[in-house]
């Protein structure tokens, strides 16, 4: 896992180069909405793109993480099925429902049943290298989805040349590698004896989810995330029981809403008075993608260093493997 995280900037560069060599048809289907299907390490890309393009896409974008699909899926929906292995049970079940609804299907996978279905039906499909933990292939997933969305006519306002922006993101991560690893090490020390609570502006929730997932899978740690201003209307009251066993980590970007920034400033004081450790960082980058990738890479390094500090295997997912094995017996 250390090698995979260290090479993440190179993964982004390789993904951008590969996607440029996988042209997609410019026959854009008539569509009113988009649904991105995926679970876990394959599904976070859908959340990421929905947030990244939320104020730029011409149609609503949703991400689906279930066997079921929303009732509004139909002939004017584009469904992007993402499964690294190509065999994710929930994604394939939801995909079948989308086919029955007459949706326009596209795919992103390394192979498996999803690749076979794409070949059978002639769907636009992007292929990524297989053989690694899905969560470690985040760069491939996001770059592939960006390539799909660009072909559909939806690109970020601040970087419409999406593959160039992916390359720029990789270059920025290489430049800032030292400061990213240093901060991750400092926060790993803080979290060695404290429970992490992750916070940010509502628009940043996809990044917070990525952090939570990485701390869960790599560091084998339970943690919570919430967003401002919504947490001010519920979770804030729960801080009556906050204490020095908690570390509140705040992720910021220059796009934080001004009023939300004030809410976070005031809440940091509340959390500190409860005894919690309060830490914060500001994303670096010229575009939203670059800023979000900066934070993603920081979270990846944090999860790895926490795992190494406590002596757990960041690759091991024995509980997931057990669950899949038991479910397979019931098929």
Image (cartoon, rainbow, N blue to C red):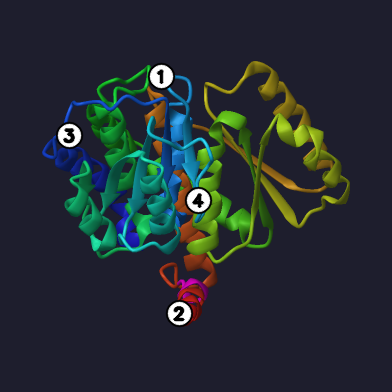
Q: Earlier in the sequence, mark 4 or mark 3?
A: 3
Which quadrant: the N terminus? Answer: bottom left
Q: Residue furthest left?
A: 21
The Cα–Cα distance between marks 2 and 4, rounded to whole angstroms, is 20 Å
Q: Residue furthest right?
A: 240
Residue at the image point whose x is 66% and y is 23% from the top: 261
Label 4 element class: loop
Q: Which residue range is magenta in the image?
A: 317-321
Residue at the image point whose x is 82% and y is 37% from the top: 270
In the figure, 307 relative to 64: above or below?
below
Q: Residues within 10 Å of mark 3 (few under 14, many from 20)?
A: some
Residue matched to label 1: 58
Label 1 element class: loop
Evaluate if marks 2 and 1 touch, with contact meaning CB atoms under 8 Å apart.
no
Residue matched to label 2: 325
* Left or right of 229 on screen, residue 233: right
Q: Residue 151's x, y, as percent?
A: 24, 28
* Left or right of 260 on screen, residue 102: left
Residue matched to label 3: 24
Residue matched to label 4: 65
């Amino acid at each position: 896992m250390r090698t995979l995280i260290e090479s993440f900037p190179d993964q982004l560069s390789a993904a951008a180069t590969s996607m440029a060599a996988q042209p997609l048809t410019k026959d854009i289907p008539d569509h009113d909405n988009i649904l991105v299907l995926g679970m876990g390490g394959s599904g976070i890309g859908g959340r990421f793109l929905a947030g990244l393009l939320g104020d730029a896409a011409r149609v609503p974008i949703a991400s689906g993480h279930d066997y079921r699909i929303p009732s509004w899926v139909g002939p004017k929906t584009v469904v992007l099925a993402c499964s690294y292995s190509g065999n994710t049970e929930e994604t394939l079940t939801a995909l079948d429902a989308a086919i029955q609804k007459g949706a326009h299907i596209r795919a992103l996978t390394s192979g498996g049943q999803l690749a076979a279905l794409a070949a059978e039906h002639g769907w636009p499909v992007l292929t990524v290298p297989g053989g690694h933990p899905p969560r470690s292939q985040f760069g491939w997933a996001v770059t592939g989805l960006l390539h799909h969305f660009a072909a559909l006519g939806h690109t970020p306002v601040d970087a419409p040349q999406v593959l160039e922006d992916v390359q720029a993101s990789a270059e920025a991560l290489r430049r800032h590698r030292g400061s990213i690893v240093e901060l991750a090490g400092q926060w790993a020390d803080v979290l060695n004896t404290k429970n992490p609570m992750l916070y940010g502006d509502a628009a940043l929730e996809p990044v917070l989810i990525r952090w939570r997932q990485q701390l869960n899978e790599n560091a084998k740690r339970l943690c919570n995330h919430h967003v401002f201003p919504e947490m001010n209307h519920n979770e804030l009251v729960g801080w009556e029981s906050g204490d020095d066993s908690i570390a509140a980590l705040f992720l910021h970007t220059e796009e934080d809403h001004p009023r939300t920034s004030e809410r976070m400033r005031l809440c940091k004081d509340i959390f500190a008075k409860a005894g919690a450790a309060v830490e914060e960082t500001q994303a670096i980058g010229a575009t939203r993608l670059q800023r979000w990738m900066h934070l993603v890479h920081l979270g990846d390094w944090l999860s790895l260093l926490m795992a190494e500090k406590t002596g757990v295997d960041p690759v091991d997912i024995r509980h997931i493997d057990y669950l899949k094995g038991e479910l397979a017996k019931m098929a």
